[in-house]
Amino acid sequence: MLAVDGFFIVSGYLITKSYLSSEPVSYLFKRILRIYPGFIIAFIVSIVFCEYFSSYIMAMPKKEVFDNILNLVFLNAPVIKNGYPGFFYPEPNGAMWTISYEFHCYLAIMLLGFLGLFKKKKLLLVITTVAIAAYLIHPAKYVPFAPPDTSSAIRASTAFGSRIINKLKFLTLESSIQDLRFLGIFLAGSCFYIFRDVIPYRPSFAVIAAMLLVGCLFSKHLAEPSLAVFGGYIIFWFALHTEALSISKFFNRTDLSYGIYLYAWPIQKALISQLPHITAYALFILASILSMIMAYFSWTFIEKPLLNLKSHYLPQNPKLARMAEST
């Protein structure tokens, strides 16, 4: 979960920069191109893997097909009841659960921009603080965790229209606590971008931030806000003020991160189902290699070609780009 939070902090920084250097329509178009194409293919691959590498016999009922079409549209993970029987997490691709929250944050940035809040820096900081505080006092935060049963989350209904309404309610209002959590973390990254000119980045401060972060991580109340503040400081100090490794040049041109995230889960499920006695170390190595291969093909043949469309049809506004740099 710490890695997911770290990703949302970085994403908040970069997405805010993207919004402030784009027209709203261009921004939304770019975000759709970045998220949907890779997600759609990984969604289909996850279902296919579930058919061929699990003991599940693929005979998807019409209701399940309908649910999965909506899941695909709303960026939710595929749902196949007992896809991997006997697994603690039987889902075909449980890692996809964060993608919809990421897109919710993209839309939130559009709303904040429309309201002109990126020009009101102190108010943005207040909104970020309120979102994190609301998450901390949310009653669901202290309920013991259990793997979600998405198949029973939608109430059965004989009326097709009622089923659609119930499903849409669930998909668009999945979990208020998670929306608050990720919005707060995401906006923390936005604040690091908006206040970048006044934040002093020093090695000594990074050491102090690391010590405070480690201490706060042992508190269920302080872990999340400390990760947003101290963890964010460490991330951006390291990213902006340390020399990049030579391998970074390759990953700047070939972004495997999204593909690895999307394919690691179904690949691990397939390996475990076919090699039940595989060790954790062997699983890690083999799944890492296969995930990077799948991510490379996803980037090369799906993500990158479609991302290139944004430069052909929606060129960046130079005036807005200069404004973003001076914000």
Image (cartoon, rainbow, N blue to C red):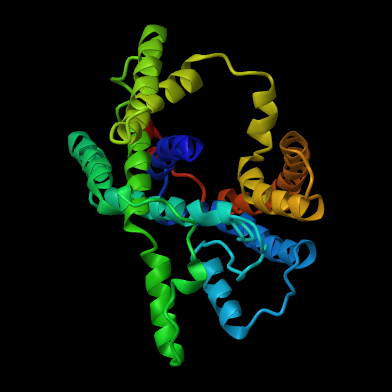
Q: Which of the 4 quarters of the picture holds residue 111? A: bottom left
The residue most toward the bottom is 159
Quick one: 247 or 316, which is closer to the camera? 247
Left or right side of 24 for 256: right
Q: Residue at x 62, y 57 (%)?
A: 93
Between 241 and 119, the one nearer to me in the picture? 241
Residue 320 percent location from the top left of the image: 38, 40
User: Which of the pair 12/44 is nearer the observer?
Assistant: 44
Residue at coordinates 47% horizontally, 60% vertically from top-left? 148
Toward the top, the furthest residue is 204
Q: Is residue 192 left or right of residue 29?
A: left
Kindly identify the residue that appears in the image at 78 percent across and 40 percent down: 286
Residue 325: % across, % down:
38, 30
* Foreground residue among 92 and 16: 92
Is residue 13 among the parts visible in the rendering?
yes
The answer to which quarter of the image holds residue 72 is bottom right
| 76 versus 59 height, above or below | above
Q: Is residue 114 visible?
A: no
